[in-house]
Image (spheres, rainbow, N blue to C red):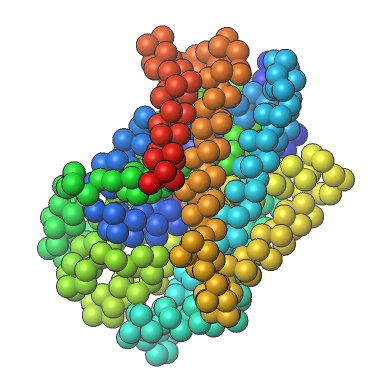
Amino acid sequence: MDNQSAHGMWSSRMAFILAASGSAVGLGNIWRFPYLASDNGGGAFVLVYLACILAIGLPILFAEVLIGRHGRKSPINTLLGLSRETGHSPLWAVIGVMGMISAILILSFYSVVAGWTLHYAWLYLQQLLGGPGITDGGATFGGMLGSPKTLLIWHSVFMVLTIGVVAMGVEKGLERSVKFLMPALFLVLLILVGYGVSTGHFGKAAAFLFTPDFSKINGDVVLAALGQAFFSLSLGLAGMMAYGAYLPRSVSIPQAGVAIAITDTSVALLAGLAIFPVLFNFGISPTGGGPGLIFTSLPMAFADMWGGIAYGLAFFLLLMVAAWTSSISLLEPPTAYLVERTRLTRANAAMLAGLLVWAIGIVTLLGFNVWSEVKIGGKDLQGAIEFVASDIMLPLGGMLIALYAGWVLDQKLTRNELSQLSDGLYTAWRWSVRVVSPLLVLLILVQKFSG
Ligand code: PFF
């Protein structure tokens, strides 16, 4: 018998794969991955990143989804229920609490950055209709960051879009939107890669991404790659646990998980292969671009290229869509929790959680202008929130989830949830979540903070 979640269920395996891939594929792939790769040694970073996805990301993805499916509730209540059922301490629910805090923090800056993409799409739309163009990418980006009003408007629009989908629920909101948005995203991305190929600089971009210079691998690069692996696969904050709760029992978690990881990784690599050729073609160095890379450099290339305005519009809309399907998965866990714990309707719960995120986002966006002097550990407010949430809290959360799946849950339970794995692969999975992943995460964090 397949028990159901009170919040609704995915209607098919494909719906889950699309929604979870929608969560995974986001600003992390198209905005964060290219600038992290170029700032951390290109191929060296990519190699470590791929290793992290395979050895740590995939096993933890299975763990999150199976815990979610077994519990069928929001992450905190799933962990509480499972711990009680197996006679373990309810303190394990702290993973869910930490995850919810990370989700709220990440969404608060994620929405601000998604707002940048909306602003840029708007600028290109105006240009298409005969308005003034972006001629100086740096000035446009700087001007936008310097204007709290512009940032606030687009951050607010984006939060309204996100709350709207989550308020409509699992099938009518989440599932219906990803079914339409994900194929659109792939289409635009493929067109952009096609353009990259036509520039004649595709080979250089591929070499930049795939030729590792091992001397560039150090603690910072490994921590950044690990953090990005968690961020990109939406792991460590129990977001995949929340989506797993709506997964029918007939769906194979390993199969769906592999499909999600392949989709996510290929989109990151494809985004690199779409962006770097364009930069090289216009003689722009990608290194040192930081978070502004695609917002300052790409428009310079767009300004020079044939059809650049339409390309710019398509690119930033693509980014917005990718961000949207991810942000709904960040708002889902707190919303589901509020629905379970209060008498709020789903719509009101989504609104309340969204309002909190929106308010924290204002702190982030003021950090770019009014509070630009404020630095935490040498980082601006957004950088600091991003670092703590993505590079520290996600790996820590992931480590706890791995330990929970490996040591707390009964082996019979996990074997049953992963029944499609061969004995050998199941043993490999169990080793990864019991020992390898927690140890690697711990080593990387300790190494980073001791030196
Ligand atoms: N995976 C998303 C991205 O790569 O942009 C970001 C994200 C979404 C992280 C959802 C965590 C999460 F739960």
Q: Horizontally, is 245 left or right of 309 in the view?
A: right
- Work out whether 92 lies above or below 20: above
- Position of residue 281 relative to residue 404, above or below, is below
Give the percent coordinates (x, y) of residue 298.
Answer: 31, 71
Q: Position of residue 359 (x, y in %)?
A: 69, 66
Could one spot residue 95 in this view of the protein? yes
Residue 324 lies left or right of residue 139; in this view the side is: right
In the current view of this chain or complex, which residue is farthest to the right?
343
Residue 39's place in the image compared with 432, above or below, is below
Residue 177 shows in the view: no
Viewer-nearest residue: 238 or 40: 40
Observer-nearest of 314 and 328: 328
Q: Residue furthest front?
A: 450
Using the rendered view, name the quadrant where residue 429 is placed.
Answer: top left
At 75% across and 20% down in the image, what residue appears? Answer: 84
- Residue 411: name its quadrant: top right
Marks counted in the figure total: 0
Q: Residue at x 40, y 90 (%)?
A: 132
Identify the residue shown where x is 40% and y is 57%: 32
- Snapshot quadrant of residue 237: top right
Q: Percent position (x, y) of residue 285?
A: 21, 68
Determine the residue positioned at 58% across, 67% down. 364
Q: Residue 195 at x, y = what percent?
A: 23, 63
| Direction from residue 228 to residue 154 in the image, left or right | right
The quadrant the N terminus occupies is top right
245, above or below 134, in the image: above
